[in-house]
Image (spheres, rainbow, N blue to C red):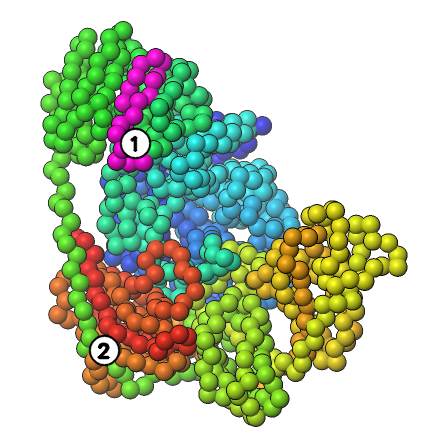
Amino acid sequence: MSRPTALSSGVELDVRGIRIEGTERVVLCASLFYFRLPREQWRARLEQVRDSGYTCVDVYLPWNFHELAPGRWSFEGRRDVAAFLDLAQETGLYVIARPGPYICSEWDGGALPAWLGLDPDLRVRQHEPRFLAQVTGWFDQVLPLLAERQYPADGPVIMVQLENELDFFDCEDRTGYLTALRDEALRHGITVPLIACSGQGDIEGATGDVPGIIPACNFYPDDDSPDIEPEVRRYAQVLADRDLPLLITETNRRHRTLRRLLASGASLIAPYLQSSGWNFGYTPSTGNWGNPGNFMSHGYDFGGYVSSTGAERPEYAQAQLLARVIDTLGSRLARAGSSVPRVPVTTDFPTSSSPSARDLDGGGQLIAVPHLGTAGTAPSTAVVNGVPVAVAPDSCPLMLTDVPLRPWGHAGTLTLASADLVAASDGVLTFSSEVPVTVVLGGKRVEIPAPGVGAPEQVTVDGLTLVALAPGDAVRLRATERDGTVRLADAAPLPSAAPSVEVRDVRRRTAGAQEESAGTHELPPALEALGVYRGRGAYRTTVDLTGVDELLLVGAADIVDLSVGGRVHPTIAGFGAAQRIDVRETGGRVGVEAVVEIWGHANFDDARLPALRLGALRGLGSLWTVRDVTDVSALWEVHGHWAGLPAPVRGLGGWSSTRVGIPVTYRRDIRSSTASALHLRGVAEPVRVSVDDGEPRTVHTEDPWVLLPAGTHRISVTLPHHPSGGGLRAELLGLEPVMDWTCAVQDDDVLTGFAATSEAERYEVRLPLALEPGEEAWLDVDLSDLPPSDKGFAVRPVGTQIRVTGWAAGECLGRVWAGGRPAFSGGESNILWVPPGWSGLTLLVRGAAGPGTPELRTLRLEFADD
């Protein structure tokens, strides 16, 4: 079925591929995010992508990075996305713009503003009027910027992505929702193709099957899987049946895998995060691929070809080699259809279960032959159409078979070339390989020895000069003369050793940042309700603990330092899971204080824990005194399998049946004169719980609690029959709410303003610095004697049970948690990065309760390789 491809002739997408101004192109695209880099580095990073051979960058535009508070917009400084897009055009790069409204990207809330969760009737990522009204406000700001910078008229934007991996999310009306987003884009004059990416291959789930929205695919395979090619070819065919190309909008960064995707039919290949960056300030998210969740680090780096500091990794040269192959084959490859090899290919090494090939326009094939073995072992052998050829481990040469050579000044046909063709001119073919190159031409088979660095090998066959370069030389290739003379660019200087400096002398401020009063409240409000979308708040009250052994804390997120009667309890970072707090050593009327810090709102939608739901709010949640605990594991009626009437009565989970894995329901009445919490102990697999025959909810092992109002309730628990399981126990906790709270807040603006002040009194201290749990110290670090570095430097706080927030040049750098912390993901999680040229360094160090005494022993300053 044919679909509309674009309203502009500048960029066209159909089964033949991507055409820009009428020219077919294979597009290599690197993710590069302006909001994760200092503005001063934008141009250098864009030029670095261009010099890698990639021709495009994809860039998210985070809604909540630009709308700082409801109706408070900023597109200045590091938020000047228009300037970033203009720089991309000046650099010669295309742009795929991804304005959401939801972006994921391990970013605070997936870019959805935190205050959206304050409206109980607003449902994010749904075809729902309240949410769409908010999206319209965002699109009214951002889409005109994109429309003004579309290709070819006034800018580099060649595609605009709507939403992001919607097939992961439970959207009730995908067609209606995506239609609304499409109509907004068209209303604002977007004429380049509109795309929507599927995160797990559900094309209709990602696009709503809406006309005018072109599906794209995100693939994150195991790089060593032998089955990548058949999966990718399947999607290439599915899209070809719709007269569309295969656009891979996200995938792994390893070029061995990218070559396999290219051979399988991709017209766009956009490995996610080739150019790394940083989560400055309070922008990281929570809930990234943990068990069930974890914290995203200040560093945002998944091993792409450029590190967070801008250093080029070995994959950078691999990018240049792949780009040279694509450029050399040009439109012959860009117009090629996906296929399988027309000649037999066998190997003595682990390889693809079904290799892919491209049927080149004008004849011949490009065949990817991946060697999935370990690097460093001896070369292995593939047999291609009966010809043995050498293949290096951990490589994927793009071999050519039966390719007419007339476009390159020769009347013959290249029957086989076992290595990458990185340049072709009148009568000269230049290959790149680290092993011997086999070429079959005009019935003649020749082998070019493995080239050495700086010493190309060459032979001449039937008037055609064949040159082989080592990969390190191939990336520096500037020209190959008719006689085989090779001209190379100068080699880049080797990086210098990275020094480090130990800092022990700092200046401590005599006072901390002032809190702003947020009033008194009967129950603890969410921080967002107090106007804190990034930052922290304090909750204070008094409570009578006479006869109370424990408290129950429900829904607290993200980081809670709880003090009861002067005793600081271990820091809580449980993503909203109910927490039992032992207060047996505390009695009478005591003060309660909780300092709650937002690390970041969930960027995914994980139903297992309250704070991992997309749009979930942050704060203390609710605190209860536990007045009594009753075991309610017995006297459950059994319904299901062959249980008849009257219903048998068994212990919870105690029914015996041969129907293993089939759900069985247990029911009983539970009565409490106060609010209560039902705790299901021993939950292994998710169970369904309904109260008074209401809508069932899923209870998980991570948070096996159900809150109940006072009264008598009919409880139904449905679970798969699991005779090998450990069994369930149930207990009922009688609760009373802790009330009458006084609140104070410090949002990121308040904290950043205090960090930047020069008026605070200070005194000299020498590390190590010991702190009490919950105690804070503001430290100023003198950097005036440090040597200059064009990549900045990292600050590594060394200590135990401390959380450190850093500021420089009037901006929050990020946060580090040393000792006793939850799981982290992303890049380097133990450092704060100070960009080059950013002045000053102020640290807020807070002691956390846990094993060991909170202590900052030293600060290690580490300089990135130049």
User: How far from the left and from the top, in percent, is residue 437?
Assistant: 23, 21
Looking at the figure, which quarter contains the N terminus?
top right
Crowding around mark 1 (Cα neighbors within 10 Å: few <14, some 14 to 19, many 20+) is many
User: How far from the left and from the top, in percent, is residue 801?
Assistant: 36, 73
Report the span colored magenta.
Answer: 374-392
Pointer 2: what residue? 767
Q: Which label sits on residue 738?
A: none
Q: Is residue 542 left or right of residue 732?
A: left
Mark positioned earlier in the residue sequence (1 or 2): 1
Pointer 1: what residue? 393
User: How far from the left and from the top, in percent, is residue 153?
Assistant: 37, 40
Amino acid type assigned to the residue bearing label 1 in the image = Pro
Check residue 324 for magenta coloring. Answer: no
Q: Is residue 436 left or right of residue 330?
A: left
Q: Identify which residue, 705 or 785, lies in the foreground.
A: 705
Single out the residue that lies furthest toward the top.
Answer: 443
Q: Is residue 283 above or below residue 48?
A: below
Residue visible at 51% across and 67% down?
A: 574
> Residues under labels 1 and 2: Cα distance?
50 Å
Amino acid type assigned to the residue bearing label 2 in the image = Leu
User: Residue 107 sits in which quadrant?
Assistant: bottom left
User: How far from the left and from the top, in percent, is residue 116?
Assistant: 55, 64
Q: Is residue 185 above or below residue 406?
A: below
Q: Identify which residue, 749 or 463, lies in the foreground.
A: 463
